[in-house]
Amino acid sequence: MTEPVLTARGLRKVFRSAGRTVAALDGVDLHLAAGETLGIVGTSGCGKSTLARVLLRLVEPDAGSIALAGRDFRSLAGGALRAARRDIQIVFQDPVAAFNPRASVAGVLGDPLRIHGIATPDALPQIVHTLLERVGLPSSLASRPVRDLSGGQRQRVAIARALATRPRAIVLDEPVSALDVSVRGQILNLLDDLRRAENLAYLFISHDIGAVNAFADRICVMESGRMVEEGPPNAVIRAPRTIAARTLIDAVMRLPRQDAASGTPT
C-alpha cells in the first residue's frame, strides 16, 4: 500500500476562555492519499478550521501526531519545519483577507518562491506568469494590485500561490463559500483539473455537504471536535448514520457530482 501523504492520529486541541474549556479537536484521526480529495464537513464551530490550522502547524495541538510525506511533522522546527511546509499549503476562505491588499499579484506569488529559495530573481517573472496561466489567468495580471481583482480572480491567485512550492497536499478551507454561486463551479473545476494533473492530495473543508459531494472522494463528518461519520459521498448522503450528517444534508441543496459548473474565468 502506498504511504499516505498526510496522516493524523489522536489530534486534540483545547481552548480556554472566560473560565470555559472547549475541546475544538477531541481525538481526530485522518489519512489522505496522493491524488485523493477528502471532504471534511460540519456545522460552524465543529472544529473544521482548527483542524486545518493544526495540520499546517499554524496552531500547535495539545496532543496527537501528524505525519507528512512519511515524516514526523510535529517534531520539526526552524529550517526543517520551513522546508517541510513546501509539501503542504493552504487556500483560505476569504480571498480578500488572505492577501495584503496593496501587494501586486507578482509580489504575492513571488513571496513563497523567494522564501523557499525556489527561484532566482531573474527567473521569478517567468515562473509567476506560468503560475497564472496554470490557474486560468492572463499573465498581464502580474502587475495589478490584488485589491483590483474580482473575488474569483483573487481565489485563483490564492490557488496559484499554494501551487508555487509544488506541494504534495493542499488544505482547502472553505475555498468557495465567499464566492458568487456562478463562480464556485469554475473554481471547483479548476481545483479538480489541477489535482488530476499534479496528483495532488486535497483536504476540502466545508459546511456545505452538497459542494463536498460534488468534489470529494470521501467525506468525514465532524461534530464537537470529533469525526463521527466517514464514507463515500453517495453513501453518507443517501444513508446518513448520525444526526450531524442528517442535519447538514437537510440544510443544503444536494449537488450531483457531475454538475460542477464550467465557464470562463471570473
Image: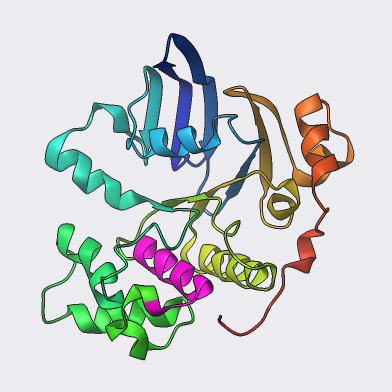
Residue lying at 21% horizontally and 39% vertically, measured from the top left: 81
- Check the image and name the residue furthest to the top: 19
The percent coordinates of residue 70 (x first, y second) are 36, 36
Instruction: Kindly indicate the quadrant of the structure image that contains residue 82.
Output: top left
Where's the C terminus, which quadrant? Answer: bottom right
| Region rendered in magenta | 148-163
The percent coordinates of residue 164 (x first, y second) are 32, 65
Residue lying at 60% horizontally and 56% vertically, measured from the top left: 177
Instruction: Kindly indicate the quadrant of the structure image that contains residue 226.
Output: top right
- Check the image and name the residue furthest to the bottom: 140
Q: Would residue 76 appear left or right of 12 to someone viewing this image?
A: left
Magenta: predominant secondary structure element?
Answer: helix
Q: Nearer the viewer, residue 211 or 217?
A: 211
Residue lying at 26% horizontally and 77% vertically, measured from the top left: 106
Q: Nearer the viewer, residue 80 or 208?
A: 208
Residue 160 covered by magenta stretch: yes
Total tally of numbered discs in the picture: 0
For the rendered model, the colour scheme is rainbow
- Check the image and name the residue furthest to the front: 18
Q: Nearer the viewer, residue 191 or 168?
A: 191
The percent coordinates of residue 199 (x first, y second) are 49, 60
User: Is residue 6 placed above or below 98 in the rendered structure?
Assistant: above
Q: Would residue 136 appear left or right of 182 to someone viewing this image?
A: left
The percent coordinates of residue 88 (x first, y second) are 37, 48
Q: Would residue 195 appear left or right of 161 to someone viewing this image?
A: right
Residue 17 covered by magenta stretch: no
- Check the image and name the residue furthest to the right: 238
User: Is residue 182 placed above or below 203 in the rendered structure?
Assistant: below
